[in-house]
Image (tube, coloured by chain):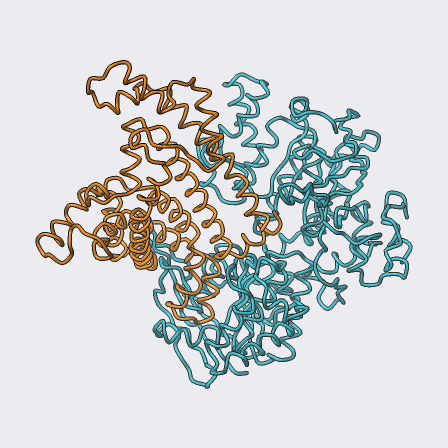
Chain colours: A orange, B cyan
Amino acid sequence: MNFFIKKLLIVIPTLYIAWTVVFVTLNIIPGDPVNLMLGGRPASDEVRENVRKNLGLDKPVFERYTSFLINATKGDLGKSYLTRQPVTTMIKENMMPTIELSIGGLIFGVFFGVFFGIFAGTKPNSMRDTFSMIIALCGISLPSFWIGMMLIYIFGTTLGWVPIVGDGFVSLILPSITVGLFFAGGMARLTRSSLVDVLNQDYIRTARSKGISKYRIVLRHSLRNAMIPPVTLLGIQFGLLITGAVITEEVFARPGLGQLLLQAILAKDIPLVQALVVYMTAVYIFLNLIVDFTYGIIDPRIRLERSRG
Amino acid sequence: MVEILNVSNLSTAFQSDYGSKQALKNISFKINEGEVLALVGESGSGKTVTSLSIMGLLPNNAYIQEGNINLIDKKNNQVNILKLTDEKHNLIRGNDISMVFQEPMTCLNPTMTIGDQIVEVILNHKKISKTKAVKEMIDLLGLVEIPDPTQRAREYPHQLSGGMRQRVMISIALACTPKLIIADEPTSALDVTIQAQLLQLLMKLKNSIVSKTSILFITHDLGIVRELADRVIVMYQGEIVEEGQVKEVFDNPEHSYTRNLIQSLPEFKLEERKLTKKDDNKQTKVDDNEIILKIENLFKEFPVEKGFFKESNETVKAVQNISLNVKKNEVLGLVGESGSGKSTLGKSIIKLLQPSRGQIYFNNENISEYSNKQMIKIRQQMQMIFQDPFASLNPRKNILDTLIEPILVHNLMKKNEAINYIKEIINDVGLPIESLRRFPHEFSGGQRQRIGIARALVLKPEFIVADEPVSALDVSIQAQVLNLLENLKKSYNLTMIFISHDLSVIEFFCDKVAVMYLGHIVEIAPVSKLFNSPKHSYTRALLSAVPKVKGKGKEKILIKGDIPSPINPPSGCVFRTRCPNPGIDCKGGNIEMGLIEVEPGHWVDQCCANCN
């Protein structure tokens, strides 16, 4: 348990550093948020000054930095320059669609990734290996906007099987496949190579010497041992998804964190960008923790190291 | 005699990008019921391919060209194994024929408890309930003498020592009382003491519950063959060159290869050397007056990593209070089980590890507190030969680059001068000059170790620590490399510390021997004294554990269990927990460790010196 407390303690400094980096970068790069807000419309200096004051932009940089920090400790991450809404509310509103999409993509990706990984890895250098790996390569390399549009065209417009826009579970299918394909490609390749490696291990030869069926050898003896690298990838990719898949959201006209972040950066909406970055960093750390925890479930040797370390 | 397995005209080949390579050439042999048949030969001779062909476990790139393997199975039917489908073969594997593999560290599934791994094979072949299988599993663990079987069954392989894991492997092989057990170098990766325990266990089981089971014992160790087997088959380059009753083959080897194999054993080389020693004028004399290396009260302890905030107060006590002298031109052997601290001591001496306490004097210069920068100059004088010749060479550097680097680092010569000099050295270690342009993977194990030796010699050191330099090599290659070291020792005027777990190699090569146990030196003596009249019980046990071609029938002194953890060594005499005949004071841990001189030059730990 000590191990996880240790990990949790690292969260606070990490978030602080991420926060500061965003603040500094956004203040260094040129561009005035007030100008961006006005969107090129003419306004008197007085109005500008007023807006500036309202947003707290008239104060010196350092003071803004500290007051942000102080408010943050109270749980107030500030208000968006653009919409004047609290940033936490904005994140909350956009979080659910993103989580839905991520989980959809995750399920699709893991299922097909592991399936093709096993299919290929149990018979390396065979026809089915080549076939699976070509599919995996497509999943990784085809751009998601293209996949998204093709899916809409084939299943939405031509065949009419699924609605293109709308709410609910059904509307989630095509976007999930779009993000899941990328996911599945990576998973399949990694599961395959890891499985090939494990199947060459001495303990698999021992298992075969016991006269066990090949299905049991793959499912009981190999898969668990082969899962460490794919689980690592899973953590990273799920992190990418849950912080927003901009292009997929755009193609399917879904709200989401990816969209929100893009808009916030373009508008130089410092509080919103900061809040989003902090949220994403926290998600990454949390997912990493889950991945670490999963290692322990998969491999008892890692459990032992931990109780020592 | 009932024949249970008949291999006839078996040929197996490996397919690779460069064409196919014949691994077995038309071999035929049979195994009788209840017999122990040994299969000996060096690596690459086809021993393992034979066993894998029988098991049907050949790698994908291998195929059987022709031949038959007929087995009389448990139901007394004759089956040709090579004609079976994989599904049918599965009914035989683990049931009629089972196998014990070489590497106990990697042969068990790390993510399954050992209990599950044994139960699995029982349930796979016997139609019994799970509870009954679990009961059988516990019985099996007891049978292979694993203490506390119910508890152990729930543990994972990494929680067990190598010897214990190999016992688990044996219990898996025994589980269905097979007709034949194939044991492929089952003890080669283990210490002699553990090996002796396992061989004894195997013979005990063989004589009791599985008396009708035959054993095909694959080994490179002729001593084991002599002690264990009824019949022996000698293989060389995929062919059977000799076959016969063990005694006959050893007494009257017919094939020249068998003769060479027996002759290259260190125990035979030793006799030869004793004979030639008298008229060997070139033999360098140990200079009694000049002490090159002097170690006083050396300690090396590693902290055990503990929590994030907690400072650890536990340490691995790897080297404990060691004092010794090495004279000029002397070879000091360090011997002991793995975990005894030999390598740590070797590395601490040349300061690849910084010792925790104690003094090291090299040519009367106290180097124990020297920084890495100060050591650079000293390192020209002291070099190391490493155990694993492949892993210790950079795979991306050719041999010339590897060898020239130290010369350029120390700025000893210009580059073209250095190249000529290296050509001389590579010639000295018996390699052709063309090898300089090649990369480590292009060499065989023995050649790589020659490169490792050349690397150590390049700076013309006067002192070398050789850490198990021949342990990874086949017997005949081992003999060649030892001869080479012997010659180089003379021509380069070397003083050496020679670390080995192999007592016969030590006896062959060293002048003086220090026996280590749990970080302590328990006995140190000139080689002939130590081998002829060992005083410490541990030394005696080590000596008797070695399977010897000539020592068949001698009573073995077995020591129990595994070496204790160096984190919590026993108090007092560290050997008392495994001592075959501890005294009363000794048992209570009341006697401090410390060497006393029992005869001139022969030092023994006081606990054992008093006991006996």
Question: Going by the image, does B125 lie left or right of B257?
Answer: left
* Residue B269, visible in the rendered structure: no
Residue A128 placement (x, y as % from top left): 25, 58
- Quadrant where the N terminus of chain B sits is bottom right
Residue A110 placement (x, y as % from top left): 33, 55
Q: In this view, does B16 lie above or below B157?
A: above
Question: Going by the image, does B236 lie left or right of B571?
Answer: left
Corner quadrant of residue B187 = bottom right
Corner quadrant of residue B201 = bottom right
Q: Is residue B92 above or below residue B302?
A: below
- Quadrant where the C terminus of chain B sits is bottom right
Total label count?
Answer: 0
Residue B390 placement (x, y as % from top left): 52, 42
The single residue placed furthest to the top in the displayed view is A45
Residue B125 placement (x, y as % from top left): 46, 78
The residue located at (15%, 54%) in the rendering is A163
Q: Which of B334 and B289 is in front in this view?
A: B334
Q: Is residue A289 above or below residue B102?
A: above
The residue located at (45%, 41%) in the rendering is B441
The single residue placed furthest to the left in the displayed view is A158
The residue located at (57%, 61%) in the rendering is B156
Corner quadrant of residue B158 = bottom right
Q: Nearer the viewer, residue B66 or B525?
A: B525
Q: In this view, does B209 lie above or below B497?
A: below
* Residue B581, visible in the rendered structure: yes
